[in-house]
Image: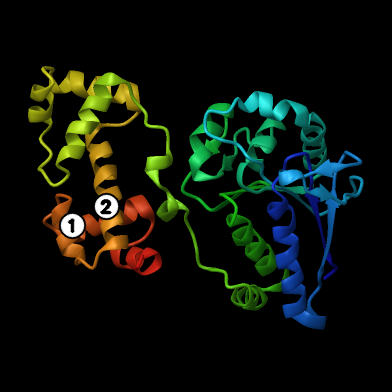
Amino acid sequence: MSALRVGVLAYPGCFASEVFGVPDLLTMARNVAGPDGSGYEVSIVSPRRRVAASGGTALDVSPLREVDVLVVPGFELLPGTDVAARLRPLAPEVAAIRSYAAAGTGVVSICVGAFLLAEAGLLDRRRATTAWLLADELARHCPQADVRPECLVVTDTGVTTTAAFSAMYDFALDLIRRHDGAGVARATARVALLDDARSSQAPYVDERLLPRAGDGFSQRVMRRLDQDLGARYDLGALAAAFGVSTRTLLRRFAAETGRSPLEYLQGARVRRARHLLETTDRTVSGIAATVGYRDPGTFAALFARHTGRRPRDYRAAFRRTG
């Protein structure tokens, strides 16, 4: 098998660590594979002669060239930023991405590099992911994309998108696995101290950092539900507390937040349970009772649906000490 040609598209303001992260791991894989491996030819390419990455780091770039895989790193994008204005100066890069895709090159975005792929039209009618913090923003920016905020890596007909920052390694390990085999990928992960068994970014989501949806009415309902997460959910009593019918409560809450009060409550209960699993030694059944579930099995199933991990597995991965 011939060496795989990988190009990393550099552009003004891109994250320097995401420019070099995939190439560095491929270098490790080449060393792990030894003479039996097919290797990788990596180049940092740009339609510009000079590129300064994040923090003003100057990058040594080569002109655009033919590659087998094009990797598009991410850039700083805060929630609420005018995405169109941020992307407008990157028209040369968007045109390059579009050209590579038209030529049949596999295109991969890291983190919010997905917004560049969306601008190039590559995410229309495709499944995609990005950093969980900006997944809703991507869905608004590219309504024709099927955004999967829980996924670490999504590949759909030649286009791959990844979650935030460290998910570039999940992609790179998968690339190594497909190019050099599972053994090389596993050994590379061990050398680099990487988890090669991750499947979801759901355990890492911190809803406190997400913009809180809803206006005055739904915000008041949320605050009331937050006051006693262990109380039995009673839709009728909740509606009566706000002087509306259950039908009106559900309609107004859904119109403002896109979900039901029960769905919000379940998410809030899981959020509280995550905190308790991370910071206390309380039993899973005790935590389940605290957040309103007498049956630990029901709680565990709900927790796994929201986070991708069972409570004990979550505690083992995220327990904080001291």
Regarding residue 57, the answer to whether it shows in the image is yes
Query: Where in the figure is residue 49, as x and y percent of width and height?
Result: 92, 41
Is residue 199 toward the left or the right of residue 183 in the image? left
The residue shown at (67%, 73%) is 181
Regarding residue 143, the answer to whether it shows in the image is no
Circle 2 or circle 1, nearest the eye? 1
Identified by mark 2, the residue type is Leu
Query: Where in the figure is residue 44, as x and y percent of width and height?
Result: 83, 52
Badge 2 element: helix
- What whole-number distance in Å separates the C-alpha atoms at marks 2 and 1? 10 Å
Reading the image, the residue beneath label 2 is 302
Reading the image, the residue beneath label 1 is 288
Is residue 202 toward the left or the right of residue 287 in the image? right
Identified by mark 1, the residue type is Ala
The answer to which image quadrant residue 116 occupies is top right
Badge 1 element: helix
The residue shown at (76%, 78%) is 31
Taking 144 as reference, is 154 above or below it? below
The residue shown at (27%, 37%) is 264
